[in-house]
Image (cartoon, grey):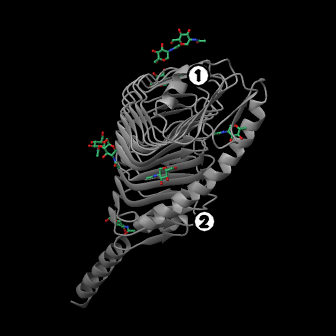
């Protein structure tokens, strides 16, 4: 009798211990700590992996109901979660110097992704692919591809400073806050073949971009220091705030013949090869100012009938201002400022700082400086994004 009673008690104690282990947040401090979770299919809390861990394997875990946070584990080489389907909270990895293998073949849903400084991670083993996440931040990794991250919709999608990343090919249909792809591989081809609308878009230092279905940018869109020569927006009708092309030194052709309104500033600056501004055949309204400085030989906006702000066009080339002078005198330009000038030794944008000098060669040096400033800005932004993501979830 006594021995049976003892046996039952012992069994209950073991079961209790197992449940207790799966039913709360856990902190894994050493490789052996993870084995305590080996029978859990659901962990009802956060999983935090500490600095001393070198490999992680969670063979049976299917769901983590909280966050999965791995920070500063400089000896961690691999993460293997063969059954993991869902992380309901944030999936945070930061400062994992030697992590080279991340295997989560079943992972499909994540609250958010925030990965910072993973200098040994060149690929993901996400066979099924993550199709749901509210935001994605991937910065300072050696990832060569984002295959395995296949979101259809997201709030923020921020991919920056991944120097080996030469392709982003995403099925995103919309981005409700911000889409930023900046300072990755120099020939990065940014392909958003399904994207219909986004609130903000910033593309910097990319080699090609592809937005065949983009119809609306609710706030602003900017292309800065990219190396592509041609870009087209066949479906784009409306930009809610500013539309800017700055410092794209190989750009010769921009076509957005369906675009009818830009709510803020319409700006071209420092695109040193750009000559013909004739790809905006439907542009009617600019809610802010028109600010064009560069090497234009030709510009025409046949439908433009309402510019609420000022108008500035300065070019180093010979230029016929007749079309714009007419728009000025007929009251199309409502702002006080009006400038249209060709054959300048220096073409300046409205803020005064921007300039394209007549001689060639001066561009690259200053461009580098700008890029450096931009980089510092991005790190801060990335930091804020991490903090924000942590606060939200
Ligand atoms: C996991 O389950 C197996 C079989 O039920 C058992 O032998 C083992 O002790 C359990 N491990 C843990 C850590 O609870
Ligand atoms: C966002 O995109 C997804 C995927 O294309 C689509 O299912 C969803 O309806 C879109 N949402 C809005 C508000 O446009
Ligand atoms: C979009 O960009 C503008 C200008 O940079 C910024 O003021 C605004 O907060 C951004 N909106 C979102 C939702 O990120
Ligand atoms: C970039 O990707 C798009 C769509 O996948 C493709 O049409 C285009 O040719 C690619 N550009 C380059 C330079 O490979
Ligand atoms: C952005 O504009 C599109 C198309 O007009 C609209 O469907 C979408 O709801 C807007 N998004 C936001 C966040 O306002
Ligand atoms: C500019 O790009 C558009 C759209 O891709 C194309 O139809 C047009 O021929 C190009 N113009 C020049 C001068 O290359
Ligand atoms: C300017 O555009 C007109 C009409 O599109 C074209 O006939 C002319 O050749 C262009 N001039 C230059 C210098 O590209
Ligand atoms: C254009 O380049 C000049 C010189 O590098 C810089 O001062 C200016 O801020 C740039 N303008 C824009 C709008 O990026």
| Quarter occupied by residue 129 | top left
Instruction: Indicate the position of residue 65 as horizontal and vertical percent values.
Output: 35, 64
Seen as rendered, the residue at the extreme left is: 1
For residue 368, side relative to residue 339 (left or right): right
Please tell me the numbered disc located at residue 183.
none
Q: Residue at x 54, y 64 (%)?
A: 31
Q: Is residue 128 visible?
A: no
Mark closer to the observer (1, 2): 1
Seen as rendered, the residue at the extreme front is: 329
**Few, some or many residues within 10 Å of mark 1 (<14, 14–19, 20+):** some
Instruction: Indicate the position of residue 327 as horizontal and vertical percent values.
Output: 49, 28
248 vs 8: above or below: above
Lower sequence index among marks 1 and 2: 2
Which sits in the foreground, 331 or 389?
331
Quarter of the image that includes the N terminus: bottom left
Which sits in the foreground, 112 or 260?
260
Secondary structure state at the residue bearing disc 2: loop
Q: Residue at x 41, y 72 (%)?
A: 25
Quarter of the image that includes the C terminus: bottom left
| Quarter occupied by residue 296 | top right
Secondary structure state at the residue bearing disc 1: loop
* Residue with the mark numbered 1: 321
The count of marks equals 2
Instruction: Indicate the position of residue 187 as horizontal and vertical percent values.
Output: 60, 29
Which sits in the foreground, 353 or 7?
353
314 vs 106: above or below: above
Instruction: Indicate the position of residue 237 as horizontal and vertical percent values.
Output: 36, 32
Q: Is residue 110 visible?
A: yes
Q: Residue at x 65, y 46 (%)?
A: 374
The residue at label 1 has a CB less than 8 Å from ligand 7:
no
* Residue with the mark numbered 2: 51
- Between the residue at mark 1 and the residue at mark 2, the CA separation in whole angstroms equals 65 Å
């Amino acid at each position: 009798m006594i021995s049976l009673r003892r046996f039952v008690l012992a069994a209950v104690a073991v079961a209790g211990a197992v449940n207790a282990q799966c039913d709360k947040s856990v902190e894994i401090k050493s490789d052996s700590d993870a084995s305590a979770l080996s029978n859990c299919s659901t962990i009802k809390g956060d999983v935090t992996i500490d600095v001393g861990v070198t490999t992680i394997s969670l063979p049976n875990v299917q769901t983590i109901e909280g966050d999965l946070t791995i920070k500063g584990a400089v000896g961690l080489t691999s993460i293997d979660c063969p059954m993991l389907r869902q992380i309901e909270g944030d999936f945070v990895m930061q400062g994992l110097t030697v992590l080279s293998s991340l295997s989560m073949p079943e992972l499909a849903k994540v609250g958010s992704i925030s990965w910072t400084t993973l200098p040994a991670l060149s690929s993901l083993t996400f066979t099924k692919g993550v199709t749901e996440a509210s935001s994605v931040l991937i910065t300072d990794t050696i990832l060569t591809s984002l295959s395995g991250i296949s979101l259809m919709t997201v709030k923020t999608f921020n991919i920056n400073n991944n120097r080996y990343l030469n392709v982003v090919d995403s099925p995103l249909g919309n981005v409700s806050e911000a889409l930023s792809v900046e300072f990755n591989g120099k020939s990065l081809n940014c392909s958003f073949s399904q994207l219909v609308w986004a609130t903000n878009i910033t593309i910097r230092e990319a080699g090609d971009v592809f937005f065949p279905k983009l119809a609306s940018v609710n706030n602003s869109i900017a292309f800065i220091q990219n190396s592509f020569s041609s870009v087209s927006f066949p479906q784009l009708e409306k930009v809610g705030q500013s539309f800017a092309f700055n410092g794209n030194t190989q750009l010769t052709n921009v076509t957005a013949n369906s675009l009818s309104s830009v709510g803020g500033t319409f700006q071209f600056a420092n695109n040193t090869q750009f000559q013909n501004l004739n790809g905006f055949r439907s542009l009617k309204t600019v809610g802010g100012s028109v600010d064009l400085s560069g090497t234009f030989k030709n510009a025409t906006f046949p439908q433009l009938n309402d510019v609420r702000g000022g108008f500035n066009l300065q070019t180093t080339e010979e230029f016929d201002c007749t079309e714009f002078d007419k728009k000025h005198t007929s009251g199309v330009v409502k702002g006080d400022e009006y400038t249209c000038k060709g054959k300048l030794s220096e073409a300046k944008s409205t803020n005064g700082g921007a300039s394209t000098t007549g001689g060639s060669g001066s561009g690259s040096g200053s461009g580098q400086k700008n890029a450096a400033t931009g980089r510092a800005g991005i790190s801060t932004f990335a930091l804020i994004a991490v903090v924000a993501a942590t606060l939200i979830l």
